[in-house]
Structures are given as C-alpha cells and as structure tokens.
Image (cartoon, rainbow, N blue to C red):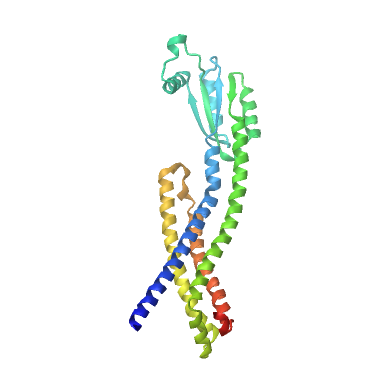
Amino acid sequence: MSSSFDKFQKRKLISSYFSVVLSIALVLFLLGLLGLLVINANKVANHFREQVTVTIYLKDTAKDIEIKQLEKSLAIADYVKSTNYVSKEQAAEILKAENGEDFMQFLGFNPLQNSIDINLKADFVTSEKLEEISKDALSKNFVAEVSYDNDLVNLMNDNVRKISFWVLLLSGIFTLIAVLLINSSIRLSVYSKRFTIKTMQMVGATKRFIRWPFILNSIKLGIIGAIIALIGMGFVLYYIDKTFPELTLLTNQVYLIALFAGVFLLGILITWFSTFLATQRFLNLKTDQLY
C-alpha cells in the first residue's frame, strides 16, 4: 500500500515538474520570438524601404558620356544603395515577358526610354529626399522624367511608426504576462508541498533552510525550460534566415547573443523570485490557514 502511494506521489511530482517546465519553456519561447521581432523590426522595415525604386527616364538625345557621368555620380552618392541602367531594348524585353506579347509588332517601333533605376538607403526613403533627388535629376537637360511612388513611401513610413509603437507596447504587456504565468506555475508547485514546509518549520528549521531547496529546484526547472525555449528560438531563426536570406537576421550576432542570454537569465530570475515569494507566503501562514 505504501509502495503504491509512493509511486503515485512520484508520478504526481513528475507531472507537476513537467507542467512547470512546459509553462516556462512556452512562455520564454514566445517572449524570445517577440524579442527577435523587436531586434529585427527596424531591419525588416529598412529592407522594405530599400525596395522602393526611383526611375530616371532619359531622353533619346542623351549622350553616352552624359549617362555614364550620371550613373557614376549616383553610384558614389551617400544616399544611394544601388543603381541599374536599363536600356530601352531591355525594358521592351521585360515588358514583353510580363505581358506575354510583343507590343513592338503592333507599333512597329520601341516607344520606351532608356532609364536608370535607383534604390536608396533606408534612412533616405522619405518624401523630402525623393523630391530633392527628383529636382536634382530634372535639372539636367537630358533627363525626361523621374518616377517614384510617393504615396507608397508615405504609407510605408506611417505604418513603420505605428508598428514600432505597437511592438514595443506588446513587448511590455507580454513580458508582464510571462512573469505572471511562470509565477502562477511555480506557486502551484510550491502549494502542493505547503504541509511539508510547515512540518519542517514546526521542527525548528529556519526559513532560509526551508526555502533554499525549493529555490534551487525551481532554478533547475527554469534552466531546463529556458534551454528548451532557446532551442526552439534557434530553429525558428534558422528557418526564417533560410527562407528570407535577404533579411540577414544572423548578422546581428551581438544582439542575438544578448537576447539568448537574456531569455536564459530571465528563466532563472523569474523562477527564483516566484519561488521566494511562494515559499515566503506559506512560511508566514498559520497551520489552520493551510487548509
């Protein structure tokens, strides 16, 4: 009978530990993913900003030396990320591939213009800077037109500001929820041993002596949960980097190491603090209050 009861208690204890570890791992995993989002939010936003293309259309009378000088001046400009010269023949081939038909057969000539596509660095993708670039290019007599989507730029910048605000707000809220959830799991684990705590106290054990094994055990569970969460974060980070290599998520190694270390330490600190509070509460209860 005693053996069966011991086995039951052992299974119950293992189940309790498993639920605590799982809770810690899931919460820290989600918190870590949110941390990854916060760290890379600016990089993702910059990636999309740098996809905005400014197209400078050139007149047919433009000389090769003028075009090359314009390309060279744009290439060395501090606000330009990349430039690409597109001849009218290349533009015709691109349009033909997109539409699936050769429009030149109907027109009998190529109405398109030679052009230079510019991609700006993220910090310079603003309406003011685009307007400045446009005016500078149009001041040259061989430039026919400058084209870019100003509405898209304004919409993108507005959305980036809004998303940044909500990401920071959600980070704070989710961190609080994470602490509360882990604290709840730890308290339930300690609650199941409240009679053991009171018995030890009644035979003369000090609060520090009683509290330490619980804290040490919870820290071990926190470490296990944090390691599981970090493994999950590593898999997600690897998958995203392979799927979207242009985001170069793995280049911010200092931030990533800091985030992983932060998640690991958070798992230890939350479990330590929660266990301290939970054991302190039961240590201060009277015997009749345990029921």
Viewer can see residue 212: yes
Looking at the picture, how far across and down is residue 131, in whole percent? 64, 30
Residue at position x 56%, y 59% in the image: 175
Relative height, residue 9 to residue 251 (above, below): below
Q: Nearer the viewer, residue 152 or 134?
A: 152
Residue at position x 58%, y 50% in the image: 167
Relative height, residue 115 to residue 211 (above, below): above
Q: Where, quadrant-wise, is the C terminus in this rendering?
A: bottom right
Q: Nearer the viewer, residue 202 or 151?
A: 202
Viewer can see residue 254: no
Answer with the quarter of the image where residue 92 lies: top left
Looking at the picture, how far across and down is residue 279, in whole percent? 54, 77
Looking at the picture, how far across and down is residue 107, in whole percent? 47, 10
Relative height, residue 190 to residue 163 (above, below): below
- The residue most toward the bottom is 203
Q: Where, quadrant-wise, is the N terminus in this rendering?
A: bottom left
- Left or right: where does residue 184 sit relative to residue 236? right
Relative height, residue 17 to residue 57 (above, below): below
Q: Nearer the viewer, residue 237 or 16?
A: 16
Looking at the picture, how far across and down is residue 39, in whole percent? 53, 51
Residue at position x 59%, y 33% in the image: 152
Q: Nearer the viewer, residue 79 or 183?
A: 183
How many marks the image carries: the answer is: 0
